[in-house]
Amino acid sequence: MTKDIEVNAQKKLKSRVRKFKKVLKDDDEKEKFFDTLGASVEVFLPSKKPEEGDSIILYTTAEGKIVDGEYSYLESENEHISLTISDKDLELFIQVFKDFKLE
């Protein structure tokens, strides 16, 4: 079963690479691609206990505007919870990360 997943993943990756090459060469393809794009960025927060961990996931529009967020907490290998970040708290995270840029 794992081998099938790996083969499918390799095929999908090759397909995505071909699509990205088209996006780089054709402005119409680029516009279509970015009109449907959204992104999420997971930020792993520092922790004093390596076996525990927490993170925030920020979801954006194609323009990069943060529209939603999620808090993820891992207490142990089998104990994990995700919580929706309220709009009020999301504004705080937006302010904290306003100068963060991916390059």
Image (cartoon, rainbow, N blue to C red):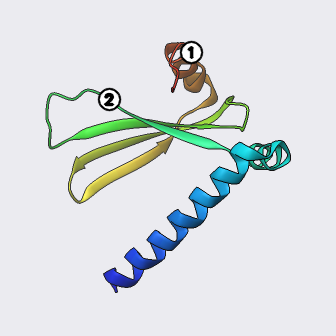
Residue under the image location 13 percent in, 34 percent down: 49
- Marks 1/2: CA–CA distance: 16 Å
Query: What percent of the width, then of the height, locates residue 18?
Result: 62, 60
Q: Nearer the viewer, residue 43 or 31?
A: 31
Query: What percent of the width, then of the height, locates residue 68?
Result: 62, 37
Residue 37 in sight from this viewpoint: no
- Lateral position of residue 88 relative to residue 71, left or right: right
Query: What percent of the width, then of the height, locates residue 59?
Result: 60, 39
Read off the residue under disc 1. Answer: 98
Query: What percent of the width, then of the height, locates residue 78?
Result: 23, 60
Say what secondary structure mark 2 lies in. Answer: loop
Quadrant housing residue 65: top right
Other-residue count near label 2 (Cα within 10 Å), few / some / many at <14 / 14–19 / ≥20: few
- Lateral position of residue 77 relative to residue 22, left or right: left
Q: Amino acid at mark 2?
A: Leu
Read off the residue under disc 2. Answer: 45
- Lateral position of residue 38 relative to residue 79, left or right: right
